Image: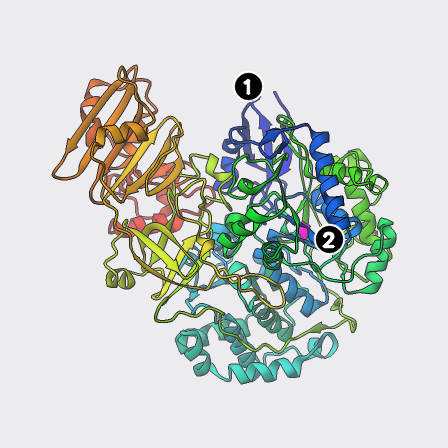
Amino acid sequence: MHPEIKTTCPYCGVGCGVLIRLLPNGQQISVKGDPDHPANFGRLCSKGIALGETIGLEDRLLAPKINGQTVSWPLATQTIAERFQSILREHGPAAIAFYVSGQLLTEDYYVANKLMKGFVGANNIDTNSRLCMSSAVAGYKRAFGSDTVPCSYEDLERAKLIVLAGSNTAWCHPVVFQRILKAKKDNPDMMIIVIDPRRTPTCDVADLHLALKPGTDATLFNGLLTYLDQQGESNPLFLQHHVEGLENALQQAKLSAADIPSVAAITGLSESILKEFYRLFARTERVVTLFSQGVNQSSSGTDKVNSIINCHLFTGRIGRAGMGPFSITGQPNAMGGREVGGLANQLAAHMEIGNPTHRQMVQQFWQCPDLSDQEGLKAVDLFQAIAAQKIKAVWIMATNPAVSMPNAEAVRAALQQCELVIVSDCTEQTDTMEFAHIRLPALTWGERDGMVTNSERCMSRQRTFLPAPGQAKADWQIITEVACAMGFAQAFPYQNSRDIFIEYAQLSGFQNNGSRDFDISAYSQLSKNEYDRLPPTQWPVTANAPQGTKRMFADGRFFTPSGKARMLPIVPRLPACLPDAEFPFVLNTGRVRDHWHTLTRTGKSPRLSAHKVEPYVEIHPDDARERSIQQGMLVEVFNAQGSVVVRAQVDDNQQRGSLFVPMHWNAQFASCARIDDLVFAVVDPFSGQPEFKHAQVDVCLYQPAWHGFLLSRRRLSVRANYWALTRGDGIWRYEIAGDEAPDDWAKSARTMLCTSEQEVGWSEYFDIAATRYRAARLVNDRLESCIFIEKEFHLPSREYLASLFKKTSISNQERMGLLSGKALSGVDHGPIVCACFGVGKNQILHAIQAKGLTTPEQIGAALKAGTNCGSCVPELRKLLLESGK
């Protein structure tokens, strides 16, 4: 029996502990939550539970390649070093850039930052975390003088009021959401308020939902600050001793949000709901405001963050249990990247490029040439500089900017003409890898060893439990070898991740003496055994706090020159791209429950691919009606920058005039669904974070000549005007549509199924008048593939047909009914609702009727649905309503 290994989940910023055990075959793992980890206490969401389905080596990059040819590591490393040195001689250090990722471990991040800033000699290293939480960084730094998240998850359980601002916590941070639900169950007096233009699944438990007009958050919180002042709800002692900037902040709040009627007019909220929100915030001492991408991803995201912080500082609700402004991050190590200076405007260990003393300290510690005093290029500017040929070489690590950046088509064009593109990744084919001149195989979760930091400043270990596949190497090792080949071997002596972490811990305490928030100097002398056994701990970790620090600012001392926190005067600004007559809709982008970023990991899991099987757009029923759009139709969402074709999801939880499209799908999984092509490269002036929540678009019907789907045991190269690919249990599923009907359906179907074989069992049905074609391919009485085509978009259930692929042979009765697409007996499980346990919609509806179930808890007892991460509970409630329960 293999021992259990403690590691950390590679998905969101919750940072859940995971227990892994290798199964006897050595090719699979068992996964369960770590009951001792302080982030999750044994809970896991659907993505965490399915981790064992994502470790296969299919699609892996397993050897270095230059211009498509496999090469040795020494050749790849030397080639990069020589190309970098040539560019440095000819164009200078500013012509080289790194674009890194919150998927990297802290040690990887540190070495990349050290090489670029310390030895290449420019600060052009930025991270995809710029896209998700840099406004929170800028807001915290403006208010506190440091990028310090003051809270702990424990504060969510000790609060009396939780305000969820711009966060669909139920789907994006399910384990934190479960902690909130349990706290509310244990504390029925706890109130939950959700601020979000959409009615998301998170609203299912909200006592109050503020469906404000998109982009008006700063006005809402300025109005709250005004109200707090008018009601005498300040904390005079705290303000006097620990805060500066009060008068200017109050004056500006009153100019932009003088009273509740004026706030109501701008936000679109009723006066009564505003009064209730303001009253609850004013009269509740223990308030946590948990905010995420809906606040950060804005051209005024930093101001929105500071409008929230202002309210907490005004009332002294910070530094104490159950209160504070709490940014929850999107990636597993976005916080680690912030710590090591992975952002272009920071130095390692929370030191500042613009601070000469900090530059001198880092230069002295690293023993490197003088550090540049010029901030590097932030993500959007970085790719624009590539397009302008100012940057000649870019090294992209563990991220997919050709999909995830705003105006992603311009990013692809920039990479297409870049002199040298290097991509380190674990995946062979991504939209970004297409442009790589040099491809470097990197280790991924389960194979690598190092540190990550979650949203509450808790550092946890990711540990190795799988062998390195092929020639893949850790990112820190790849970077170190390039640094040594460039002549910097003395500064990069690392033999393992512990060597790097020790150096990093020493830098954090170097000439610190409490002057900087980030300090893990207690780890400066860790032995290998101590590093291997390091328990999850919240920084700072110092001689005075060797067990870590739960909560920051308990002493009222901040990291500004005066030692006081700053309240900022906030002037609300409209989003940069407003709807107009040509493009009358607001486009909002974001994540779905079971998928992650650009599908390179979750796309491998059948269970995670079952809930949302293709890209879609949420649209309000009235807007859909005006454009003759029905549920399930294909539509085109477009603007001057680009277009996507997605499935319509008509939903009154969506505001009129607004659309929501998930950000996950890309050219590997759909023909035309890269939604960030439509997002404008407009950024916050302080943080550089793009405005992913507010692009101007229009929507119309996409009317193909035919619609269909294809199920196959093999991955196929489907040629259709529209296609979307999903991995099923032992099969591949394609949703397809075409602009022209073929002259010969049978020939076309065989082409799509990639077969010319005549000896296999082939059943087909064709109705010329109805433009209906159905065919199935059987090999040794086993269903191998099938294709269904209709003129209209209504087609039989895929779930029943998918279940037939699990059979070793098809019975005569099943063969006779195969092309009907209908279950001959039993229940067609229907679309998956609960990914954790694979429970379908029809199963749930059948159980509700057959057993008289009336609550989600009863459904859970009968089918297990909703009993793990709970993310599907809102859908269970909806199904109960549909059933009249």
Check disc 2 and report its element: helix, strand or loop. Answer: helix
Residue 801 in sight: yes
Residue sitting at x 14%, y 39%: 770
Label 1 crowd (10 A; few <14 / some 14-19 / many >=20)? few
Residue sitting at x 26%, y 56%: 629
Viewer-nearest residue: 480 or 66? 66
Task: Give the mark toward the camera: 2 or 1.
Answer: 2
Residue 681 percent across, percent down from the top left: 53, 61
Q: Where the N terminus falls, by quadrant?
A: top right
Q: Tell me: 614 left or right of 499.
A: left
Residue holding disc 1: 25
Residue holding disc 2: 91
Whether 307 is among the magenta residues is no
Viewer-nearest residue: 270 or 846? 270
| Amino acid tagged 1 | Asn
Which range is magenta? 336-341
Q: Tell me: 534 left or right of 732.
A: right
| Label located before the other in sequence (2 or 1) | 1
The correct choice, above or below, for 336 with respect to 74 in the image is: below
Majority secondary structure in the magenta region: helix
Residue sitting at x 60%, y 43%: 398
Viewer-nearest residue: 149 or 215? 215
| Amino acid tagged 2 | His
The correct choice, above or below, for 153 with respect to 706 in the image is: below
Label 2 crowd (10 A; few <14 / some 14-19 / many >=20)? some
Check disc 1 and report its element: helix, strand or loop. Answer: loop
Residue 720 percent across, percent down from the top left: 32, 39
The correct choice, above or below, for 688 with respect to 827 in the image is: below
Residue 197 percent across, percent down from the top left: 42, 64
